[in-house]
Image: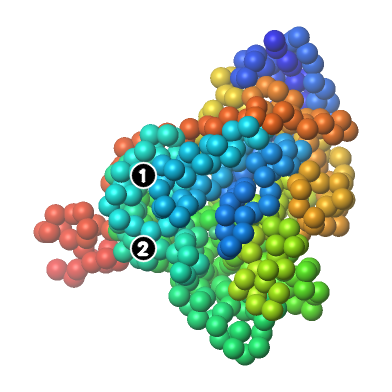
Amino acid sequence: MTKVIKGGTIVTADRTYEADVLIDGETILEIGENLKGDETLDAEGAYVMPGGIDPHTHLEMPFMGTTAAETFESGTFAAAAGGTTMLVDFCLPGEDGSIRNAILEWDRKSKDQISVDISYHMAITGWNESIFEEMKFAVDRGINTFKHFMAYKGALMVQDDEMFASFKRCAELGAMPLVHAENGDIVAELQQKYLADGVTGPEGHAYSRPPEVEGEAANRAIMIADAAGVPLYIVHVSCEQAHEAIRRARQKGMRVYGEPLIQHLTLDESEYFDKDWDYAARRVMSPPFRNKEHQNGLWNGLSAGSLQVVATDHCAFSTEQKRFGLGDFTKIPNGTGGIEDRLSVLWTHGVETGRLTPEEFVAVTSTNIAKILNVYPRKGAILPGADADIVVWDPKATRTISAATQKSIIDYNVFEGFEVTGLPRYTLSRGDVVWAAGQNSQPQPGRGKFIPRPAFPAPNKALSTWKALTAPRAIQRDPLNIPSGL
Ligand code: DUC
Ligand code: ZN
Ligand code: ZN
Ligand code: ZN
């Protein structure tokens, strides 16, 4: 069974050209002119792009005394409706701390529900050497990224020695560490200070997590990764302090990647102040939304290449769940959604405004992600042999974002009222049309697959600039690589 996507303009991360795409079963067979297939999808007036990849979601994840309400079924339906064909979800060990059991649990929960493809990042929430054996199991199963929380003291937070041990093991296994960069000790103390001062509402969340705590943690994680000789991916970069750390590291030759969220790019801290409690609490996430200056910095980073990908950190709670934090902002479940709206909001606020080219849009929503997470060119590419994960993008279609019409099962949307231009006409996942504008039909739960992401190529000395730890004594330099003056 073949399909041809006809009459569209193909946009990849490096070029834009007119051609048809012939799909045979699950993969792209040919790209060229006047192609014919058993079935034709009309792409006149549309762009044909690699399907979006959301590198950061938390579906049905137990967190802060409750469980994220977006399910694998509703989350992947929302993804498909928004042009996203793969997501990378965070797999979190349970009470027993076992990575192996966490993978089995995530497989069990997701298998019959997912309608687009997924992959996992594994969370490291503590350290002992037996975890190393389990990390091997994860890497063998195609999980090549390990997330470390530097915040959430008393729950998920890891200490520097635990991170260093884990990062060194990542280096050995050809895996890459990820960090949630916020200084959890300082956050915990600021939370108590604001509560003691009588600040109990959602604004206290923003006050207690200032950009400085994020910048400090980003710098610390970069140093630890460098010492361990491993690349580093910093999730939800929200401020200039963290961005600056990444920029500086990259300039020095370190492989450090930064992931801003569509929320931080378009929503600012005014969402927390002088608003009703529910409105503000629905927007509580970590890190919190920042001011316009930080926001502009993130946009600049995307165009300059110092930030490489755009994610959502989709971790969605109902209003009822948010109300667990009435009277104490530290108990408001942290998280917002965006899985369905990431592409259209980024197109509207990025491409339509001239901040990003269409090619850059494809790079930051798909291709760069596939490359950084080692699943390219199976995903993130319009090339013969690649999975036919494609979005036929109508740059003229418009929508007013609203919880009333979304596929997500959450009772609100942080982008409520946003007017967007640019929406999927068709979303294809491994050759199947999983979304067609106007048809509104739900893709088949369970058709999505787990996509293994193999270990990265052999650890390489080029991954570290910290010669002091690896070089023979005679040529040791100080940690900043400043010549010793001899
Ligand atoms: N931040 C959130 O807002 N939610 C989930 C986890 C996180 O780090
Ligand atoms: Zn996080
Ligand atoms: Zn998060
Ligand atoms: Zn997250």
Q: Which residue lies furthest to the left in this view?
A: 474
Q: What element carries label 1?
A: helix
Residue pictured at 50% horizontal, 60% vertical = 180
106 shown above or below 149: above
Left or right relative to 472: residue 35? right
User: Cα distance, mark 1 to mark 2?
Assistant: 22 Å
> Dividing the image into four equal quarters, which quarter contains ligand 2?
bottom right
Tell me, yes or no, if residue 290 can be seen here: no
Kind of residue at badge 2: Met
Numbered label attached to residue 259: none
Kind of residue at badge 1: Met
Category of crowding for the residue at label 2, using alpha-carbon neighbours closer than 10 angstroms: few (below 14), some (14–19), many (at least 20) = many
What residue does disc 1 label?
Answer: 135
The one nearer the camera, 167 or 278, is 278
258 shown above or below 485: above
Residue pictured at 70% horizontal, 62% vertical = 321
What residue does disc 2 label?
Answer: 223
Left or right relative to 251: residue 418? right
Give coordinates of residue 393: x percent, y percent.
77, 35
Category of crowding for the residue at label 1, using alpha-carbon neighbours closer than 10 angstroms: few (below 14), some (14–19), many (at least 20) = many
The one nearer the camera, 281 or 172, is 281
Left or right relative to 257: residue 468? left
Quadrant containing the N terminus is top right
Disc 1 under 8 Å from ligand 4? The reply is no
Quadrant containing the C terminus is bottom left
Q: How many labels does the image show?
A: 2
Residue pictured at 57% horizontal, 54% vertical = 62
Give coordinates of residue 395: x percent, y percent.
81, 39
Residue 49 picture quarter: top right
483 shown above or below 230: below
Question: Mark 2 or mark 1, which is nearer the start of the sequence?
Answer: 1
Tell me, yes or no, if residue 335 can be seen here: yes
